[in-house]
Image: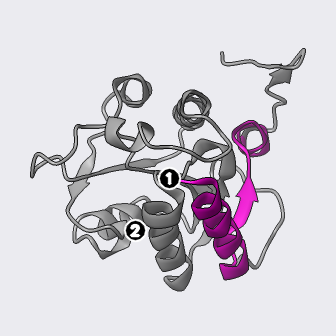
Amino acid sequence: MTNDLGVWTAEDCALVLIDYQNEMFEVIRSETPADLVELHVRLLARTARAYGMPIVLSTVGVTFGFNRPTLLSVLCELDGIEPIDRSSMNAFEDEAFRPAVRARGRRRLITGGLHTEICLTFATVAALKDGYDVLYVADAVGGRSQVAHRTAIERLAYAGAVPTTASDESSYVTGIDLVVDGGMKVW
């Protein structure tokens, strides 16, 4: 469980992005539509880059030809970040992923992933078990149904992860209000 619910800063956190691949976007059926999930994950990536937060990016099934790489629009925000491709549903079970997160040297993780009910939930619960504090960005994730997504969001909160939104997280870690005139300011 997150022990210190005080302000999280860019210096405290690493951004963990899991499976933002075309095949995952195509089947989002939860309340945040796929185009907004894409916009929100791009905002997270851009904020992390601007404030020097370490980033871990993961994909699933690319090596085996099951899925395509990270969506190009998301990848463009992550220039120089190499995705870690896995074959397991739980990123924290992957031999390259877990050490990559540990190597970032941050005990606070801001997470997003597709789908909420599988890859995000499994990785977040494993991170909590490993002693990380975790924020999950509820509007930068999506599930294959509203029920699956909502159940996973509730499960994450019960497990001890803290929900947030993309604009809140970006304002939170930077100390800057990114909402201007009702729209998102993406510098």
Kindly identify the residue that appears in the image at 50 percent across and 52 percent down. Answer: 144
Where residue 105 appears, as percent x and y from the top left, is 47, 63
Q: Nearer the viewer, mark 1 or mark 2?
A: 1
* Local SS, label 2: helix
Q: Nearer the viewer, residue 127 or 73?
A: 73
Q: Is 174 left, or right, of 54 in this rendering?
A: right
The Cα–Cα distance between marks 1 and 2, rounded to whole angstroms, is 30 Å
Q: Is 3 left, or right, of 111 in this rendering?
A: right
Q: Is 64 left, or right, of 62 in this rendering?
A: left
Q: Main secondary structure of the magenta part?
A: helix
Q: Nearer the viewer, residue 1 or 19?
A: 19
Q: Where is residue 136, by image quadrant?
A: bottom right
The verdict on residue 170 being magenta is yes
Position of residue 41 relative to residue 95, above or below, is above
Where residue 139 appears, as percent x and y from the top left, is 67, 44
* Local SS, label 1: loop
Kindly identify the residue that appears in the image at 68 percent across and 61 percent down. Answer: 150
Tell me the quarter of the image containing the C terminus. Answer: top right
Amino acid tagged 1: Arg
The verdict on residue 64 being magenta is no
Q: Check the image and name the residue furthest to the bottom.
A: 129
> Considering only order in the chain, which callout, 2 or 1, is on the residue closer to the N terminus?
2
Amino acid tagged 2: Arg
Q: Is 115 left, or right, of 155 in this rendering?
A: left
Where residue 7 appears, as percent x and y from the top left, is 81, 57
Q: What is the span of residues highlighted in magenta in the rendered image?
A: 145-173
Question: How would you rate the neighbour count of disc 1 (Cα within 10 Å): few for under 14, some for 14-19, many for 20 or more?
Answer: some
Residue carrying label 1: 144
Residue carrying label 2: 102
Tell me the quarter of the image containing the N terminus. Answer: bottom right
Question: How would you rate the neighbour count of disc 2 (Cα within 10 Å): few for under 14, some for 14-19, many for 20 or more?
Answer: few
Residues marked 1 and 2 touching at CB (< 8 Å) = no
